[in-house]
Image: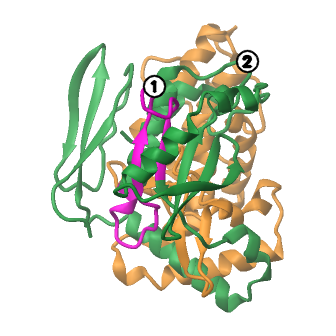
Amino acid sequence: MEDYLISALSRHAAAALRDKNRELYEQTARLRSLLPHFINPQYNSGPFILAPFDWDSRHIFVSEEYTVSGIIDWDFATIVPVQSFFRYPAFMTRDWLLDTKSPIMENYRRIFRRALSELQDETELPLLELLDRSRWFHMFDEGVQSSELGKSALPMLEAYLTGLGNKKVEVKAIPVVRGMPILKDIHVGGGKAKNEALS
Amino acid sequence: MILDRVNWAKHFGPQYPQRMCEMPDWDREEFLESVDFEALVRFASSLRNGMPCHIVDEILGHNNLVYDIEFEDTSLWVARIQILPRLYGCAEQPISETVRKYLFESMVAAQTFARNKKSVFAPEIYTSFSGGDNPVGVPFMLMQKIDDLRLDEVIGHLPDKDLYTVFSDLAREMVSLASPHTSVRLVHYVKWEKTLKLVQWSPTLRCMMIRSNWTSVGHTIQWRTTSSPH
């Protein structure tokens, strides 16, 4: 898992070096530095699980008694890491996209969380722990996959960690992958990076 | 073949997970002329020992045209036809035929895989063609019709008690998909520098192992049934 995310980051870093894109390199290096805060190394080698694209409510069918009778549209179903798998279906988290809270969505999440906790006996995976952290893991994961999403995710992820520890996130000067240049003076909030490879 | 995110990143690049672009123009009539609907109905009928059937409804989706097919005994099937001229719409960067085929086959594999899991209600696929070399002339699949209420249309009116029923089932589907007691083994190949290499085979099957430094030019995940589905 960790290797996989780093390999995705290294693609962006390599592209940044090729295009002499300092902003992208800095963003990639900062995401790399946040990685240990979001990855649980316990899941480094799995499980990886097949997931529908986003559990869209338009693709879920229910009976007259409101039991689920079908899930359609398996286009773009992908194999994802378990930390990404147990998350609230997208239709319960629309408010998060706007960084707000909606009472309707919160109610959905509260009920879903309770329903999932009832199934804890059926699996060894810590369902609620995974669910509760999934918002941030998922944001991190998507930010790593996509340099575009990474741009918007990075400040939110850093703000989240800052809030957790009540202090600024330390950005460590580590290469994205071995052999790549280190950005020595990256500061949270977008400081100027000095690096010959990018100047 | 099930889509994984290494391939996703390769095909869709920085636009993961959604591509934001202009829908290409397409001519519906022109596309429909390439579909042999009589052959479609004949084909469906042949899968049920010649029981007569006909098309009763059409739904225009984003990427697919969906037709309800009703048989003489009133049972319903669904025919799903990819709208080739605008598939995964991107006017400036249309997907290649290889990628389209890959995504189609991946979807079929994912749906079949999911269906083999206990309490996951993916519709049964009766037949599928990822290419146009079939009597209908275009890629299509025939599958089970789920003739029920769509959650997005009813969710706004549901009291907490019913929400709990729905969400409880959804949670159960999640746990089932994550279940290690699976009937399926993953074989993970990486086509690396144009040679097919077996990278990881997991007999306990909870996972596919992921390697760093991918330089794959394409890779597939295959699975095969080793015992009866749960």
Q: Which chain carries label 2?
A: B
Q: Quick check: is A163 in the magenta stretch? A: no
What residue is disc 2 on?
Answer: B92
Residue A7 seen: no
Percent coordinates x, y for residue A121 in the rendering: 36, 83
Residue pointed to by mark 1: A177
| B40 lies above or below B162 | above
Give neighbour class at mark 2: few <14, some 14-19, many 20+ (Cα, 10 Å): few
Q: Is residue B181 left or right of residue A8?
A: left
Which lettered chain is shown in orange? Answer: A
Between disc 2 and disc 1, the foreground one is 2
> Share a chain, discs 2 and 1?
no
Residue visible at 32% across and 48% down in the picture: A45
> Which residue corresponds to the image point at 72% horizontal and 60% vertical from the top-left?
A163
Q: Provide the secondary structure element on which disc 2 rests.
A: loop
**Chain in green in the render:** B
- The amino acid on which the numbered mark 1 sits, given as a three-letter code, is Val
